[in-house]
Amino acid sequence: MIDSLLIANRGEIACRIIRTARALGIRTVAVYSDADAQALHVRQADEAVHIGASPARESYLVGDRIIAAARETGAAAIHPGYGFLSENADFAQSVLDAGLVWVGPDPSSIRAMGLKDAAKERMIAAGVPVTPGYLGADQSPDRLQREADAIGYPVLIKAVAGGGGKGMRRVDDAADFADALGSCRREAASSFGDDRVLIEKYILSPRHIEVQVFGDRHGNVVHLFERDCSLQRRHQKVIEEAPAPGMDPATREAVCAAAVKAAQAVDYVGAGTIEFIADASDGLRADRIWFMEMNTRLQVEHPVTEEITGQDLVEWQLRVASGEQLPLTQTDLAIDGWAMEARLYAEDPAKGFLPSIGRLDLFDLGDATRVDTGVQQGAEISPFYDPMIAKVIAWGETREDARETLADALDAAVVWPVRSNAGFLVEALDHPAFVAGTLDTGLIAREGDALMPPVQPTEEALIDAAASLAMPGLVPGFRLNASPRLSGSFLLDGEPVTIDFTDADPGELAEADSVLIAEGGQVWELRRWRATGVAAGAAADGAILSPMPGRIIAVDVSVGDSVIKGQKLVTLEAMKMEHSLVAPFNGVVEDLTAIVGGQVSEGATLSRIVASGEAPLAGE
């Protein structure tokens, strides 16, 4: 068994690997950037090495520094986690060339399955069914447009080197193809350094089914059953579960057998996931499930597989990397119960799911079966990395048991002042289609506002909170002997509200100027009114402000241009995502400070729009 392990990753990923390594008696080494100097994974590891500045490209993506850290600390092996360099064949080869153990598949397997077009060609040769599409070398926009037209809309543009929903766009009409292609290529180049794409037929009732596979160096390959990852937003998985609802034994056997065949076709060693897309318009059927791609690493959603099989997949990885055979054979593996995982993000659903950064003054995730996280109360959520702060996992004897347990845990979650998507997750878990297991990948996009959590607390919670703030200022006996009605003005998350709290039950009276209301996975701040310094909201002056720190990647207008409401002005890249800033009303671009490639801070003015017919104010 490996005796020392460097983890080339951060956050919950590193903490997850450290937990298993410690149980096996393996010494662990963490690496960290400037932003992560006080991170939980740094404190949990036996040793930690600083590898660079906060941006990932200057730290976690610099393979030479990671290998140097392994040599410096005497680590025998490197585990890449998932994300960052985990599917980088050149880095894997460099690790092996340095005389270190690589906890992952051979570089040749990563290369074989890392590019979606080549992987599909290999699967076709191996007899694995694949989705109809274009995998050609001609990447000219005209050729790609012609192929998309021939396939028939809707189509899906996918980055050849993509993953995690990056570099992926659905196109419903030929007129939108060119813009979608440009955006997809920019995102792919930024995320993967490769702007090549492939085109696939978009399945109108799609389910995302994936199979966990594992291989060793003794010729053994097994599957650990399937997961359903169909609940997605903008191609990012939101809630995953195992097994897949509606999967009958015959279909499961066919899909899992195809996954094993795919892994065997590349002599696969270690943990991997074979991803399939299913046309679920007539339920799950083996003849309507096609190979999409292979992820040559452990997946974010691996805990649900661990929960239904009772196996530690990181332990399997470490044993296989040490040269051991797989711990179990296929006949030893069975499904026990049901598991669900929700990805808790630091983001604000009320603001278009914009990432939220800052200090976690409160962080409590209720009574879930399991929580995998890389932060704790008091930690800082930085703008440099993915905004996922935890995975909340629940197990139950049945699907409904698991769903209720997960929903209850998220309902009780308290995350403050950083915003989270916990309330949105509760709404998703309680949606009738999800409860019935009749979901598909378009559910969230279709339902839209129906899945958005309430913008305010319930009236009862709001009234009781207002009373707890107002009562200390009242004369004793006031409620019994004086005015029949009690009301006051407050600020709810900075917005003025008037609340009648005559019939309130305030519980404990608040001594501070504000109280927090936690309900349904959301948190609001109710504050006593202060006459000075109170703003009722931003003035409608046409200022286009940066919603967060980031980099300008596109400017679509010039000073003097006429624009219409909703027209894209500037595109900002932040926390691995593109954010389009649009005109708030019809008008003219009066000012423009945004420059392509420029770094901007939160709240920076990028442009200003003057309403049509208005003249600039004197002195402007």
Image (cartoon, helix red, strand yellow):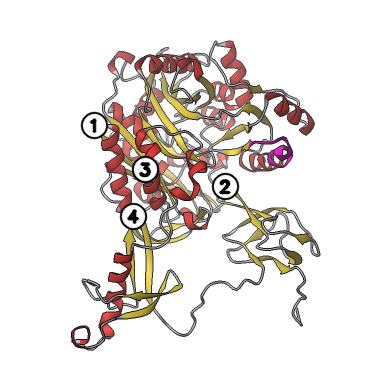
Q: Which amino acid lies under the numbered mark 3 shown in the image of this protein?
A: Leu
Q: Which residue is mark 2?
A: 576
Looking at the picture, how far across and down is residue 454, in whole percent? 41, 57
Mark 1 or mark 3: whose residue is earlier in sequence: 1
Mark 4 or mark 1: whose residue is earlier in sequence: 1
Relative depth, front residue between 99 and 371: 371
Distance of mark 4 from mark 1, alpha carbons?
A: 25 Å
Magenta stretch: give its range: 171-181
Image vertical order of residue 332 relative to residue 20, above or below: above
Q: Which residue is mark 3?
A: 429
Circle number at residue 397: 1
Mark 4 or mark 2: whose residue is earlier in sequence: 4
Image vertical order of residue 540 relative to residue 118, above or below: below
Q: Are marks 1 and 3 in contact (CB under 8 Å)?
A: no
Image vertical order of residue 237 relative to residue 528, above or below: above
With 141 as the anchor, is 38 left or right in this view? left
Neighbours of disc 3 within 10 Å: few (<14), some (14-19), many (20+)? many
For residue 3, say whether it is visible.
Answer: no
Mark 2 or mark 1: whose residue is earlier in sequence: 1
Q: Are marks 4 and 2 in contact (CB under 8 Å)?
A: no
